[in-house]
Image (spheres, rainbow, N blue to C red):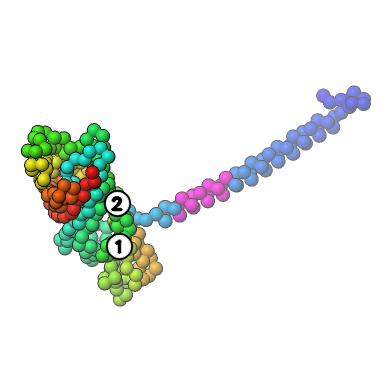
Amino acid sequence: MFRSPQEGGETPNGAVIVATTLQSNEMRAIGVMLRVDRVVRVVVAAAGLFAVGAAMAQAPVCEPPESSNEAKLLAFFATPISFSTGGLVQPLAPGQLRVAFEATYVPSPSRAIQQPEACYGIKKTENTNLSPVFPRPRIAVGLPGGFLLEGSYLPPVRVADAEPNLGSVALSLPVRLYGTYQQGPLSLLLRAHATIGRVRGSITCPEDKLQRTDPDGACYGSIASSDTYKPNMYGGELALAKSGPSERWGAYALTGVTLLRPRFQVGFLYGSGAFDDTKITVDMTRLALGAGGWYRVGTLAAITGELYSVPEDATTFRLGAAYSFR
């Protein structure tokens, strides 16, 4: 019941006015809700299109089995890149520094595993002769408790047809089992290592394999591929070392296990305008064996050598030199 402020009587039209006002507000609210609903639908549709576009923009991924040629080839080239002991397993006093340089022979894989089978449907042979030698600088520093920290970095400087950008690190603990410095001790080395980074080069379609006659054939284009190989490996080693009198020379045998997580990405522009950026990913575990030694030249310098083998993949050797600062 509504009353006029002046008369205090009933005003029948007041209820109508209020009802009309409420109805008008309700209609405006419904209109706002409809507009919000349309905005939400547009946002959801745009998000869906963005998600589809992002999914389409992602490079296709091939996950070949370990028995495939692709997996075998990726594992093969992890062997010369592996950050093994390198020929010298002598400890350093806390704060003492040692620098070294080594060259590792890069063997050629068999022609059979150079033929892709799981990730590429056209018969072709990969270019695997990017560089016959893998060079690597090393630095080691003695830590408290007898630990030894080693590191290596290979900057993006082209070596033959390969451009590396690799970093390696290792932490080891030499433990003397028996013997004196004068007699030549027998020692046990516990070591963990890791290598990450990438190597770039024309592997899938080098310049000499390009062709412009068969659009359906391999390497149809005019620009050599720019492919990326990431070795990504982590492992542990156990070495038994024997030094000569006054540690003038030494030799060791080692065994270890390496977790391989190699990744490979194609980078090739076809003559038709299509771009192949297929990614290849595979996870593997490998047993490693090795033997090496060193010979001192004077009191601070030494020449080093190591034979390193992953029986399932490849065998290589390393030659180098080291210098220890007092």
Circle 1: residue type: Arg
The answer to whether residue 229 is magenta is: no
In front: 123, or 160? 160
- Give the residues drawn in magenta, as a range: 40-53
Q: On the rendered structure, is 4 left or right of 290?
A: right
In front: 149, or 118? 149
Q: Considering the numbered disc 1 on the image, is that residue within a helix, a strand or a loop?
A: loop
Mark drawn on residue 307: none
The answer to whether residue 52 is magenta is: yes
Q: On the rendered structure, is 318 left or right of 233?
A: left
In the picture, the quarter occupied by the N terminus is top right
Q: Which residue occupies 25% across, 53% down?
A: 137
Q: Which residue occupies 15% across, 50% down?
A: 298
In front: 77, or 63? 77
Mark drawn on residue 158: 1
Q: Quadrant of residue 172?
A: top left
Circle 2: residue type: Tyr
- Residue that mark 2 sits on: 153
**Would you call the spot at circle 1 few (<14 residues within 10 Å), some (14-19), or many (20 or more)?**
some
Q: Quadrant of residue 316?
A: bottom left
**Residue 200 image offset from top left, x and y in percent:** 31, 60
**Residue 302 image offset from top left, x and y in percent:** 16, 50
Q: Is residue 309 visible?
A: no
Q: Is residue 69 above or below residue 218?
A: above
Q: Is residue 179 above or below residue 267?
A: above
Mark closest to the chain's N terminus, 1 or 2: 2
Q: Which residue occupies 44% across, 53% down?
A: 54
Q: Quadrant of residue 201?
A: bottom left
